Amino acid sequence: MPHNTELFGSDLSEPYSPWRGNVLLYGVAAIAVWIWRWNGDRPGQRPLLGRITYHGALLAVLALVLLLGTLQWDTLTLVSDSANWNLLQTLSQEAQAAGAPDIASSAYRPSGAFAIARRAEPHTAIPERPRLMLETYTVQPGDTTQSVAAGYGLEPTTIMWSNPEVEKAPDLLRVGQLLVILPLDGVYHTVEEGDTLESLAQKYKVEEEVITSCPYNTLPQDGTLAVGDSVIVPGGTKPYVQRTVTTYTGPVPETSGGSGRFRWPATGTISQYYWYGHRAIDIANGIGTAIVAADAGYVSFAGWTDIGYGYLVVVDHTNGYQTYYAHLSNIFVYEGQTVSSGEVLGAMGSTGYSTGPHLHFEIRYSGYPTNPLIHLP
């Protein structure tokens, strides 16, 4: 039977097969049915879609990494065209002639050298700058030598050794008192007759060069010191001078012996601790707070003092210990009186050299002040 070329085309090399047309029709129908089912079961296809998306993204990232690895990176330059480059070279030559660095060579690097520009940082940390001269400070209510020194980053001894009045009573400041503040730790010495750089170095236990090299001192070329001038001795120290009061000299009561066990003499908060220039603790509270004997003994002093304590009571415990209770507003005992542990001696106040109501409390052994916190419970 001859082939119909109009129906099947001009290619008559193979006989007609109805199966070829059926396969194409069946394929189209299968795809249509698959799409119809896919659209009808979208919730069920979500896990599959998620996996396909995840793997596709992973392959894309991998392909990007491989692509970047095949690229040749050129140097990041500050000059992008020949006109600007010529201008920069001209400026560079002029700058070099004036003694400036070569800006052209710093703006361009040979190909293949990777350069990263420094990012501008607007938040610049400004370090704490040292003081370059002497300062003065007016004592405020509640100040202590320790708190003033801490405010300037100094040791309390520096405040003490820079102010003669404070040196006499370093724990007894007065409101309104003017203090000299050194720019560094040490001693502020007023030159007296016979003083030399060598004698000052020996007195304050430093090398002579420490004084002469101090940038805050203005010393004559020949090294002579004029009477009345002031000299800063960096790192210098002074010996501790203990204050004394005239105490009771009458007969000692027979029943006045202490136990050696001390109790807190007042309630309140510690406003200043024991340190080199403050051989005591300060207990702050309101005026009128009861002050009691820390141990049994007899009153060896009760009255006013002229060395900054204000109204003071001293109790001798007849076992080598004495306790001092200073800045009282009232005294309820008398010299020679026997007192028991916990007996009221007076009331808290702010008399003498004081910046606020508190009790200045000392425990001395054989006349030497010790740290009260060692003995208190």
Image: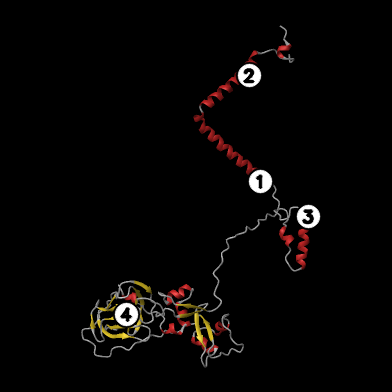
Report the residue marked by disc 4: 328
Q: Quadrant of residue 251?
A: bottom left
Q: Are marks 2 and 4 in contact (CB under 8 Å)?
A: no
Figure quadrant of the N terminus: top right
Q: Which residue is mark 1?
A: 69
For mark 3, what is the residue?
83
The quarter of the displayed image where residue 16 is located: top right
Are there few (<14), some (14-19), or many (20+) residues within 10 Å of tag 4? many
| Residue kind at label 4, given as amino acid type | Leu
The residue drawn where x is 77% and y is 65% is 94
Instruction: Find numbered disc 3 in the image and state the secondary structure of the residue it sits on.
Output: helix
Up-down relation of residue 23 to residue 310 (above or below): above
Report the Cα–Cα distance between label 1 and label 2: 45 Å
Is disc 1 in contact with disc 4, using a CB cutoff of under 8 Å? Answer: no
Q: Amino acid at mark 3?
A: Ala
Residue extending furthest toward the left: 255
Kind of residue indicated by mark 1: Gly
The crowd level at tag 2 (other Cα within 10 Å; few <14, some 14-19, many 20+) is few
Element type at marker 4? strand
Contact flag, marks 2 and 3 (Cβ < 8 Å): no
Residue pointed to by mark 2: 24
Image position, residue 269 (x, y; %): 35, 71
Q: Give the mark, 2 or 3, whose residue is nearer the N terminus.
A: 2
* Residue 162 position in % (x across, y down): 48, 82
Residue 72 or residue 179, whichever sits in front? 179
